[in-house]
Image (tube, helix red, strand yellow):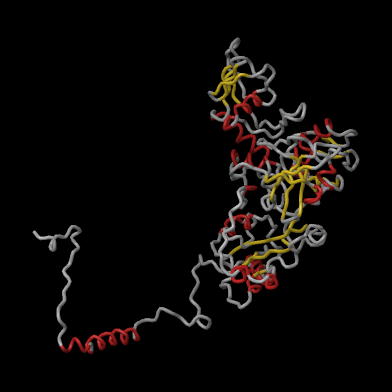
Amino acid sequence: MKVTIDGQEIDVEPGTTILQAARMIGGEVVPPAMCYYSKLKGSGGKCRCCLVEVSKGSDADPRPMPKLVASCVTGCMDGMEVNSSASPRVEEARKSVTEFLLINHPLDCPVCDQAGECDLQNLSFQHGKSQTRFIEEKRTFEPEDIGEHIQLHMNRCILCQRCVQVADQLCDGRVHGVMNRGDHAQISTYITNAIDNEFSGNMIDVCPVGALTDKTFRFKSRVWFNKPYNAHRNCDKCCGKTTVWMFGDEIQRVTARKDEYHEVEDFICNTCRFDKKDVKDWVIEGPRKFEKFSVINRNKYALNAPKVEIKTEDQILLGRKEDQKKISMVKVPLNNTNGNSNS
Amino acid sequence: MSLDTISLSGKKMEVSNKKMSFWESLYLVAIVKGLFITIRHLFTRKVTIKYPEQKRELSPVYRGQHMLKRDDQGRENCTACGLCAVACPAEAITMKAAERKPGEEHLYREEKYAEIYEINMLRCIFCGLCEEACPKDAIYLTETKVMVASASKREDFIYGKDRLVMPLEMALRNSKNKAS
């Protein structure tokens, strides 16, 4: 089947959605997606971020579709012509959807641990307005404790239901889901159950916003101060391939490896994610690469700058070891691999 | 035309090797002339001031020592979001965040606050990018009305929260001024 998206033609298998076809083309034409997750079955169709305009239904029926369609759940037809980012109507719709998503989203990015790798932040940076028209009170929920590993901030949730699908498809004995309806809808556990399934930590990775964050990483650092490395270990439960986020010699956080659409490559288990924070547990492969303009890349260099050796007396340039002193952050030891001094 | 008189750039000048007269060769006139210039400068307006005793008026857009502001209720604005540190071109700012405990709501405005906040004044170039980056209106370079003082030890240039946070009395005075 031939599909044309923004003037670019591609051959796809029957059953491919427009979003998947756009991702095969890549680049500008890919619609943003907050709820669709290619690794989770049945995801998508909830956030309406990925709306596209179908200007020609198919070769058999060339009429355009009257309304914008959600590209993540609409299948391709032979000869379909789709306008994505090129269409002003689509751009306008994305702006509106972003505004709707931000209506109840608190403006607490400076506090939120997801800031810097947040899909909603990227979306509003690209499509959002810098002012708000919403003057009413934002929806708020009572803070709820859902276990020692995962921090739930229900106020930040955009109800994409990716975490519910993780619970459905990866964990046995699912204990959480969407409670109530409409404006009162919230992600919660059934009668304050703690979430302790072995793969439950993946809901942190799939969460596009900061609603589900790592409690062991809470307020420890910002993502752009950490150095992400690809690492692996032998794990009997999962693939063991992860990204470790280091600060000095300390592993502050372990996440799954994410691709360019911020989807994990392989789900990892809770043991890898929460319990293995020692450098000795991991085999570090090398620095993880991110998009060029990602804030995570700030002040980090993939290539090592060559050290300039000046052949003079060593003592003059470097000084004596016993004279070297840590003058900044005196209370925090330089080498805090044991972690207890920093928590 | 001979080669000596051609000037391609138009700037060629003839060097004068005029013989000095007897008075000129004594240099007395030239010395007196030079002294006169020196003496004249004694009576012109002085461009320098005696700094520690005398201080120049600060421009409203000067950039001096940083201040971490408190809000009207005396709570610290800073939430240790790290944007100042990532914006800092000299990498002068370091911080460590901590979670606000119940009962500390009068001290910190948000649920996260900076437990340690340090600016290395030896590194700081007073560009003001931290102030521009701050989303919480917390850091200002124009509020203290002081310049960073000199010191003789390196440690004295690491300004911690004790020297950066706005004094509580100042916050109370500000909120009183606002109310009246």
Q: Camera-side residue: A35 or A116?
A: A116
**Is A35 displayed left or right of A30 in the figure?**
right
Using the image as rendered, state which of residue B175 and residue A321 is in the foreground.
Answer: A321
* Image quadrant where one finds the N terminus of chain B: bottom left
Q: How many marks?
A: 0
Rendered location of residue B169, percent (x, y): 68, 72
Residue at x 73% of width, y 38% of height: A158
Horizontally, residue A9 falls left or right of residue A188, namely: left
Which residue is nearer to you in this view: A333 or B44?
A: A333
Q: Is residue B90 left or right of residue A37?
A: left
Q: Quadrant of residue B76?
A: bottom right
Residue B55 location (% of width, % of height)? 50, 78
- Asked whether the viewer can see residue A188, the reply is yes
In the rendered image, residue B63, in percent from the top left (x then y), is placed at 54, 66
Q: Would you place residue B15 above or below residue B31 in this image?
A: above
Residue found at the very far left of the displayed protein: B1
Within the image, what quadrant is residue A119 found in?
top right
Is there any visible trace of residue A70 in the rendered image? no
Residue A112: give x, y in percent of width and height.
72, 49
Q: Quadrant of the C terminus of chain B?
A: bottom right
Residue at horizontal 82 percent and vertical 45 percent from the top? A150
In this image, A20 relative to B17: left or right? Answer: right
